[in-house]
Image (cartoon, helix red, strand yellow):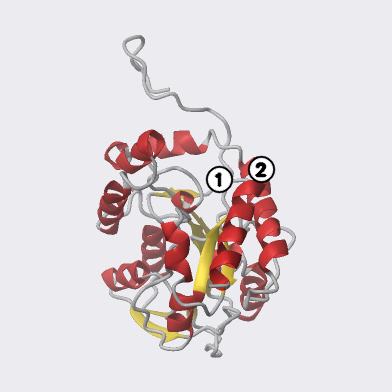
Amino acid sequence: MEPNHPIGGYFELETYNGVEYWENVLRINTARNCLRYLIQTFHIRKLYVPRYTCPVVWDAIQMEHCEMEYYSVDRNFMPLVAFPKDAYILYTNYLGVCTENSNLLAKKYERLIIDCSQSFYSSPVGLAAFNSARKFFGVPDGAYLFMDKAVSNELKQDHSVNRFAHLLERVESGPQPGYRDFLQNENLLCGAAIKTMSKLTQKILKGISYHQCAETRRSNYAVLQESLSDLNEWKGTLAEAEVPMAYPFICKKDGLREKLISENIFVPTFWKGQKDTDTGEYMEHYLLPLPIDQRYGRDDMLRISECIFRNLKM
């Protein structure tokens, strides 16, 4: 504790003093700022970037005045181009099921950066990697940055106290009443300066049962795989150590996403208005990232499967 820290008075939010999943790494306030920090640290002037990715990634790169060269991925999420040997390359571990792709690319290219925003548990490979805590757990921000290069510039610490409204509203009233606050938080993060992770976020991340969360995700994935694999156009497999963000269900059934949402099964779209006119548009319409996270169990997965079977027969 700090010298002369307060003793007594009203209680603060109950937090924890356990252990974070990732230790002895850089803690940054957002994943996009991890990427900005990497561009600054390695003085990257040109970066190969997947067309099929979140637009905030492009925004972060443009903020650093770094040139982008786009590349497409196939339906197994592998790049469709060969890169120059000395190129800086950004690759996304899509939905946390592309670890094998990441490992293959890391062996081939020395300046590979892995975006693990959708693969929190993935061990870092390549030149550098970064993840996003809020994609996997109930925190408003926070990311971990992995790189061997020594840090030269000291960052200020972020504050998260004004970013919890959507998380608290969901506890009290469910997802829909807090959705506006969720979008507002997303907008706040878009303009956030590069800072280190807040004390509040770090405290919460010290209280998570990471092993249990991982096992639940893998178990839920297995239930959906057993139920839906014959209908799923995505034929990839989950590696032994992978912990997925969602179950990638690809099915050419128009309106299926909307049917699921109408039955309170919320399925996001990754990502609207893609620059990739082949894979991006295909995935935007037909990839359904089905929720499998630690809040749910086998009965919830069977409900998802039953809803899909019922609507495919219509």
Q: Nearer the viewer, residue 30 or 118?
A: 118
Mark 2: amino acid: His
| Amino acid type, residue under disc 1 in the picture | Asn
In depth, the one of 194 and 229 nearer the eye is 229
Q: Give the alpha-carbon distance from disc 2 to disc 1, as whole Å.
A: 19 Å
The answer, for residue 89, to whether it is visible in the render is: no
Classify residue 31 by image quadrant.
bottom left
Task: Give coordinates of residue 305: x percent, y percent.
Answer: 61, 60
Relative vertical location of residue 190 with respect to residue 70 in this rendering, above or below: above
The reply to whether dot 2 and dot 1 touch (C-beta < 8 Å) is: no
**Which label was assigned to residue 53?**
none
Q: What residue is disc 1 on? A: 24
Can residue 250 be seen?
Answer: yes
Residue placed farthest to the front in the image?
Answer: 314
221 sits left or right of 190 in the view: right
Q: Earlier in the sequence, mark 2 or mark 1?
A: 1
- How far across and how far down the image is residue 184, in percent? 25, 51
Q: Callout 1: helix, strand or loop?
A: loop
Q: Residue 211: which numbered mark, if any?
A: 2
Callout 2: SS: helix
Seen at 44% across and 23% down, the residue is 14
Where residue 277 sits: x, y (%)? 41, 88
